[in-house]
Image (cartoon, rainbow, N blue to C red):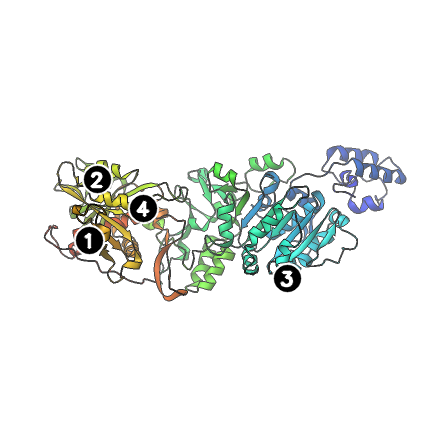
Amino acid sequence: MKEGTGHQALGIGENQGRTGEWGGGTSVPPASANPVFAALAATLCTILAPCDRDVLLVAADALEPPDRSPPSVWAERRVVLSSDQAARVGRLSSDYKPFTRDVQDALYFEPQKLGTIGVKHAQSGWTQTLLNELACLQMRDPGPMLVLAPTKDKAKEYCYDRLYPIVRDSAQIYEIVDRGSKGKYSVGYGVNFAGGKVKFGWASSENSVIGSPFRCAYIDDAEACLDEYPAGKGDLFVSAETRLRTFKGGGGRRMCINGHPRFEHEGLHKLWETKSDRRIWSIDCPVSAGGCGGVFPMHWRCVKYGKMGDDGRPDPKSATLRCPHCDRALSDDERARELWPSRERRKTRYGDLVPELPVYGSGRFVSELEDDVAREREYIGLQITILCDPDVSLVSVAKKLHEAGDDQATRMDLLNKEIGVAAPRHGEVAGSLSDALLDELLLERETQRTGGGGIIVPADVEFVTVGVDVQMGPTGMGGPNGLYIVAVAWARSKMAYVVDARLLVGLDALIGLYLPSMRVCVAETGEQLPVSWCGIDAAGTWTTSVLETCRQSVYAEGTGSRIGLVALRYDPRGVDPSQPLKCAPDNKRQHPTRPELGLVEYYYAHRHSWVDRTHRRFTEKRVRMLCPEPDQWRVHMNANFLGPVKKQHGWSEDRLEWDKAKQARDDWARAFDYAEIAACAKMDLDAIHLRSGRWSPDRGPVMPEMKWGVA
């Protein structure tokens, strides 16, 4: 009997329809999802003789249209969970978590996509949705299917403990399974059903992936599968996708991959980044509670700590989930409400097929990519973290991370499985500069005054330097391309005042417009201080352009003083950590065809030393913002993490350095570095901090003392 049997549509229960037991023949059958058949059932089943009802059932089977409702609705009508499958026994509910229905129906609403790539936390119910979709396809769109697990034992678990109980306890699914297969599932061979077959395989066997054709593939625990795939046999994902595309039968092809991420830009996380449209379960920052209404992704990177604990680590009790746009903190109660989908979206997608929710919010999957880029990706990328669970407390998760301490194995397990995020390679999660700290460094608006000579700075300010980070990498990774400029006024009191931060396009705009006109006004005296030196990032493909720019002469408007230009680049291979700044070799400073131009100002810097110096300056509150924060300022300031130093073979166990994830952006932070390097190398900053009095040209530079190997 085919799916969507007519006797069920008439409202007759599955067992009642087959046995003819109607309880006296006068009771009205249960309501059907099809109102036409329900009305017909209520009329005919009370007047027909028992022998005529059998004829009616056969006719109904032939006339009933197939059920094409979304897989989540299909599963709710047919899947029954027993005690050996789940803690919640009985009819399946697709509203177990806010995201469950969207995960299960992703390909139903976007059939043009090839499949899904899911990044998830543990105990999210994802595997159950995969099995529901598999059972739905067995009845609705049969064909050869592959369920791939990391090992043979795991494949047996999926076969005997997960899928078989669904078939056993759901009469309509059980009906289509071949008689010889009922109760005789075979791992490595599979189970036959009307029109197709489900094969259970394991990643350590290449034959499981390429041995037989399949139209649908489901790969669970993807990181473990990638690890188990035989070495020298290529890439598991490429092999499976190639075999999928070579299937010559009818029907839509699909491949669904999911698992816990491990490291950023590797394995499953790399597939999600490069192959999918990168959707994250998100909410709208609640306007009714003072929010901005912007898209608020439920990702751990939005968790900030308000203060440090007595042990020098972030205090878990101060952990808050903050909007990336307006920095508003979201409480657990607000998050629990907003995580659920909106009533309008639910009605648009499902109409009256699904029950009402006890609460509605704004939860949905939102892509990180631009619309045109997301449309071109073949896979739907779905990411959920522990923050997507309305029953979980943020502080409780933060406490578990805190209790893990320096045990990297435990922290990795918590990040990957319980939280559901990829960890930086051999490093820690950043986020040590909290929004509360940065708020404290941002002076109140009434202090951001301007005078005739520019922004007013305290009377003990000595000079101003500018740092420029040149960014010409791929767009869409934390900010646009251009020149990230930070101007800093340095005071004798060891304070640094950020007087300007902006994005410019082109070196000509920097030396022709910005530097000549940039100046500050000293409080009390009214003295105008122009820029003394400008440090420019000279790494990457723009090195030649920066060096040519640094040979030019730039003069300040009004005072006519010369503004020095110095090229800077991080080069840990050629810099001794004990001396974190040194001049570049003469052959690098000299013009290749015109040696008469002399040597340009060009320095190599040790990255860890200066990043650590900047980080300590901020955490010790020796910085004040006199200008508004530019876009992405806080994201860039938290882009670095402390990780082990890479050696020729492996990683150092006793030395840490500041590092950055491959695709993260820290342009504003590095521009601040370059401003401080210029101040130390050319303006004797550290010596000024040790004595009073104005700087004079006859003083030689004093190299700063650096704190090395901060853990």
Which mark identifies residue 681?
1
User: Mark 3 and mark 2 in contact (Cβ < 8 Å)?
Assistant: no
Which mark identifies residue 515?
2
Q: Residue 435: image x %, image y %?
A: 35, 48
Q: Amino acid at mark 1?
A: Ala
- Alpha carbon distance from label 2 to label 4: 18 Å
State the residue at coordinates (49%, 41%). 367
Q: Earlier in the sequence, mark 4 or mark 3?
A: 3
- Choose mark 4 or mark 3, whichever is in front: 3
State the residue at coordinates (54%, 61%). 231
Q: Earlier in the sequence, mark 4 or mark 1?
A: 4
- Alpha carbon distance from label 4 to label 1: 20 Å
Q: Amino acid at mark 4?
A: Trp
- Alpha carbon distance from label 2 to label 1: 19 Å
User: Mark 1 and mark 4 in contact (Cβ < 8 Å)?
Assistant: no
User: Mark 1 and mark 3 in contact (Cβ < 8 Å)?
Assistant: no
Q: Which residue is mark 4?
A: 668
Estimate how packed mark 4 is, as few (under 14), some (14 to 19) or many (20 or more) residues with alpha carbons within 10 Å: many
Q: Earlier in the sequence, mark 2 or mark 3?
A: 3
Give the left or right position of residue 72, taking residue 632 as reference: right
